[in-house]
Image (tube, helix red, strand yellow):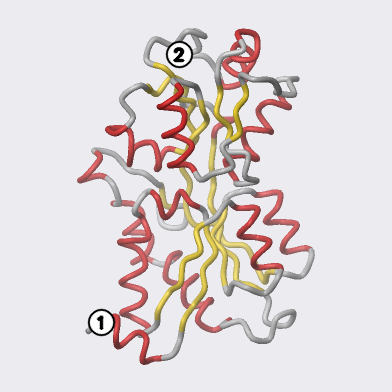
Amino acid sequence: MFLTICYLSGIVLTLASTTSTLDSGLFDVLIPPFEKKYNCKVKVIAVGTGQAIRLAKDGNADVILVHDRKSEEQFISGGYGVKRFDVMHNDFFIVGPKNDPAKIKGLKSLDAFRKLYEMKSAFVSRGDDSGTNRKELYLWEKSGIKPSGKWYIESGSGMEVTLRIANEKIAYTLCDRATWLSHKKELDALDLLVKDDNELYNPYSVIAVSPSKYPWVKYDMAKKFIEFITGAEGQDIIKNYGVDKFGERLFFPDVIK
């Protein structure tokens, strides 16, 4: 009945977002209350951050929820988006084989990446221009390394698929906290090896697509969505999500502490 009412309203908000927000299950609890409150339907397109931004630049999204600050600022300065709002953050982990042949457990991320390169340990990159992929490439660059070779595998896929490939190949990878905690029970060959490093900080932002550039976007509903996820109700959902099921938070709200 509820879904029928949403469709009858005729308002469909297109949200281009990252795979981590979908794969973690956050949208399953965050979006329905918004849909009910505003009698609308949210169409989620879950892709890498780079692709989400390209969709918005083509006028094919009303609002984006992404995690790559540099490209977000370029999106705004280019006139494609109205204003960037902080929503939440978590962090990245480096996960890998339980026996950790490269011996990176407990290292800082840059030292871990140098060790992985030195050992030519199998590493699965998302290779999809996502926020996670951009963070990974940043870490390689800051480590003074340009990864290539048979040991460096590009999945061209989202985070969940990339983790499954790493598990199958008993390889290392960089992943976000939310997707790891959501799926680690299924990844019997992998362990969490590197965390708690400032370089691994992972902030998420929400941006409404510019109605002056794309008159057809649903800007009023996009503003309502931004108000919701940065307001008390949305921030409370973010704060509590994952605690009951996984024993800890998957995301940390940035507006209401």
The N terminus sits in image quarter: bottom left
Q: Looking at the rendering, which quadrant does residue 122 occupy?
A: top right
Res. 191 mark: none
The amino acid at mark 2 is: Lys
Q: Position of residue 118 (x, y in %)?
A: 65, 9
Q: Residues within 10 Å of mark 2 (few under 14, many from 20)?
A: many
Q: Looking at the rendering, which quadrant does residue 157 occupy?
A: top right
Circle nearer the N terminus (2, 1)? 1
Q: What residue lies at 75% left-to-right and 20% top-to-bottom?
A: 144
The amino acid at mark 1 is: Phe
Vertical relation: 121 (above or below) 71 = above
Q: Nearer the viewer, residue 184 or 234?
A: 184
Q: Position of residue 146 (x, y in %)?
A: 74, 24
Q: Which residue is mark 1?
A: 2
On the rendered structure, is 74 left or right of 35?
Answer: right
On the rendered structure, is 201 left or right of 142?
Answer: left
Q: Which residue is mark 2?
A: 105
